[in-house]
């Protein structure tokens, strides 16, 4: 699932929660990665005034379905504010890492059953939407179908229950076609 789709399923309230945790420096990084800028008018003296300008800019780009902005938001939020969840998942999978960062394509090196066991472990400890955000983003970045085909994650990210089975089936078809074309 693409980052902007993750954000759309999460809904504005959850995206706002993620955004609110970001520092000024992190917001500037998100805007820059999204192709925007973080310049503020000279009249924006306070942090609150600058954050207000940045939020308008963020909302405008988010409203345009800016994929890079969504990706940057999710990565900043995860790496700066939910790193402990990344560390715990990688430890569970016995993946070598440094503070939750790894070069290993663990979605390829670990069996799907083990990856899904880790999903259940995280869902038992953390807010489901946060677990879904993390693992669906991992699925996108590591180009694996495992998490997009896990109904509990799709429900946790906010996908309506009636859409989940169709999404999984369509995803399996697209994935099979993609692999067929790559062969």
Image (spheres, rainbow, N blue to C red):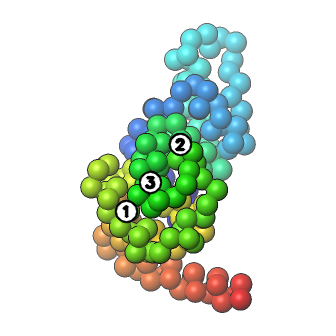
CA gap between label 1 and label 2 equals 19 Å
CA gap between label 3 and label 1 equals 13 Å
Residue at which label 3 appears: 91
Q: In the structure shown, which secondary structural element does the residue marked by tag 2 occupy? A: loop
| Residue at x 34% of width, y 55% of height | 122
Residue at which label 1 appears: 119
Residue 48 in view in this figure: yes
Q: Is residue 157 above or below residue 43?
A: below
Residue 50: give x, y in percent of width and height: 59, 20
| Residue at x 41% of width, y 70% of height | 114
| Residue at x 50% of width, y 70% of height | 110
Q: Earlier in the sequence, mark 1 or mark 2?
A: 2
Q: Earlier in the sequence, mark 3 or mark 1?
A: 3
Residue 61: give x, y in percent of width and height: 62, 44
Towards the viewer: 106 or 78: 106
Residue 62 in view in this figure: no
Q: Is residue 99 above or below residue 149?
A: above
Residue 155: give x, y in percent of width and height: 33, 64
Towards the viewer: 150 or 1: 150
Residue 54: give x, y in percent of width and height: 60, 29
Residue mark closest to the camera, 1 vs 2: 2
């Amino acid at each position: 699932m693409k980052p902007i789709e993750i954000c759309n399923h999460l809904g504005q309230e959850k995206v706002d929660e993620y955004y609110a945790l970001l520092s000024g420096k992190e917001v500037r990084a998100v805007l820059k990665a999204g192709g925007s800028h973080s310049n503020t008018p000279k009249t924006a003296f306070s942090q609150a005034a600058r954050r207000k300008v940045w939020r308008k800019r963020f909302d405008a780009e988010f409203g345009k379905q800016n994929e890079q902005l969504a990706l940057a938001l999710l990565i900043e939020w995860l790496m700066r504010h939910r790193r402990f969840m990344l560390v715990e998942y990688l430890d569970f999978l016995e993946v070598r890492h440094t503070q939750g960062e790894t070069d290993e394509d663990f979605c390829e090196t670990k069996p799907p059953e083990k990856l899904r066991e880790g999903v259940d472990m995280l869902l038992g400890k953390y807010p489901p939407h946060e677990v879904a955000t993390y693992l669906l983003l991992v699925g996108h970045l590591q180009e694996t179908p495992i998490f997009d085909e896990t109904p509990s994650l799709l429900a946790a990210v906010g996908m309506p229950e009636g859409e989940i089975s169709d999404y999984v089936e369509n995803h399996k078809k697209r994935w099979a076609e993609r692999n067929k074309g790559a062969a």
